[in-house]
Image (cartoon, rainbow, N blue to C red):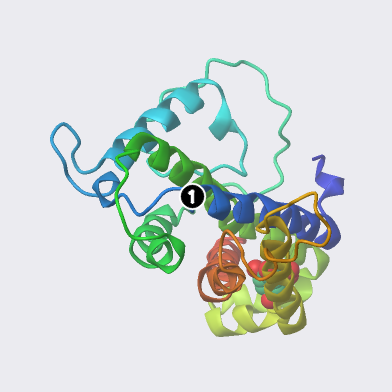
Amino acid sequence: MANSEYTLDSVRSALIREEDTIIYGLIERAKFPMNSHTYTEIPSFSPSLLHFLVINTESLQAKAGRYKNPEENAFFPENLPPSLLTSYPFTQFLHAGTTSININKSIWEFYIHELLPLFVAEGDDANYAQTAATDLSLLQAISRRIHYGKFVAEVKFRESPQDYEPLIRAKDTEGLMKLLTFESVEEMVRKRVEKKAKLYGQDVTLNNSDDSNIEKYKVDPSVASTLYKKWLIPLTKDVQVQYLLHRLD
Ligand SMILES: O=C(O)C(=O)C[C@]1(C(=O)O)C=C[C@@H](O)C=C1
């Protein structure tokens, strides 16, 4: 996007589109049981097979230019190889220095230890690599959603610097949190993702009279709203506050 194309409406539209990716990600992960060996140390994989898959995929994708896009934040940003691409279309919209804001360590922790047990069936079918691949794309979507808070914060700051500047100078974290919060928008987000999880997660048959699939979803729709209520919205707001605190550096 060109700088002038970032508006509160356009960043909210990007967040709405990301909901689809996240809900499909939940559905894809739910194809596999927990497969807990994906997340623990097993022979040849320390600290875990997921760690191995993520660090190596990020390294490959870095070479292909993924992290030149400021919307992307690596889980293991240390020692990423340089991109082999030479030119990029990305404009500098974010304030300099704020690209280093990265809360992927917290995302990794809540994802494995709190989110997965909420919607993944117990069990082990030995498809660890396939499981880790679905984890990686869901983790990347969740991370993109949360770190998009940087763009949301920049838009809000540019729209009313006179409101934000005094709070930033006073390092008033609570005041910033209050100013950037729109309760009614959050409620709409939670309701919409639950509805999307119902729509995207139902079995589709050609027989109209067959209503046996109603109320049977691939992922419990309340997991989508819990994910947003408990983690995605609060962490997106934390990123916004962190970003704003450095906005005048
Ligand atoms: O839409 C906004 O204004 C945002 O900052 C995004 C978001 C969200 O995470 O969905 C976060 C804070 C607001 O209270 C409302 C929604």
> Observer-nearest residue: 148 or 189?
189
What residue is pinned by disc 1? 29
Is the CB of the residue bearing disc 1 within 8 angstroms of ligand 1? no
Residue closer to the observer: 107 or 33: 33
Is there any visible trace of residue 88 in the rendered image?
A: yes
- Ligand 1 in which quarter: bottom right
Return the x and y of residue 69 as percentages of the image width and height: 62, 36
Seen at 41% across and 61% down, the residue is: 116
The quadrant holding residue 65 is top right
Location of the N terminus by quadrant is: top right
As rendered, which of 10 and 166 lies closer to the eye?
Answer: 10
Total numbered circles: 1
SS at mark 1?
A: helix
Instruction: Please name the residue shown 61% across and 60% down the image.
Output: 247
Tell me if 136 is positioned left or right of 178 in this view: left
> In the rendered image, which quarter is residue 81 located in?
top left
Can you give x and y, in whole percent of width and height, for residue 158 in the image?
78, 62
Provide residue 139's location: percent of width, then percent of height. Answer: 48, 49
- Taking the image as shown, residue 179 lies to the left or right of residue 130, namely right
Q: Label 1: few (<14), some or many (≥20) within 10 Å?
A: many
Q: In the image, 122: left or right of 152? A: left
The answer to whether any part of residue 98 appears in the image is no
Q: Is residue 240 above or below residue 66?
A: below
At a point 74% along the width and 52% down the height, the residue shown is 17
Say if 36 sits above or below 228 in the image.
above
* Image quarter (top left, top right, bottom left or bottom right) of the C terminus: bottom right
* Picture layout, residue 74 above or below residue 164: above
| Relative image position of residue 21 (x, y in whole percent) | 65, 49
Mark 1 belongs to which amino acid?
Answer: Arg
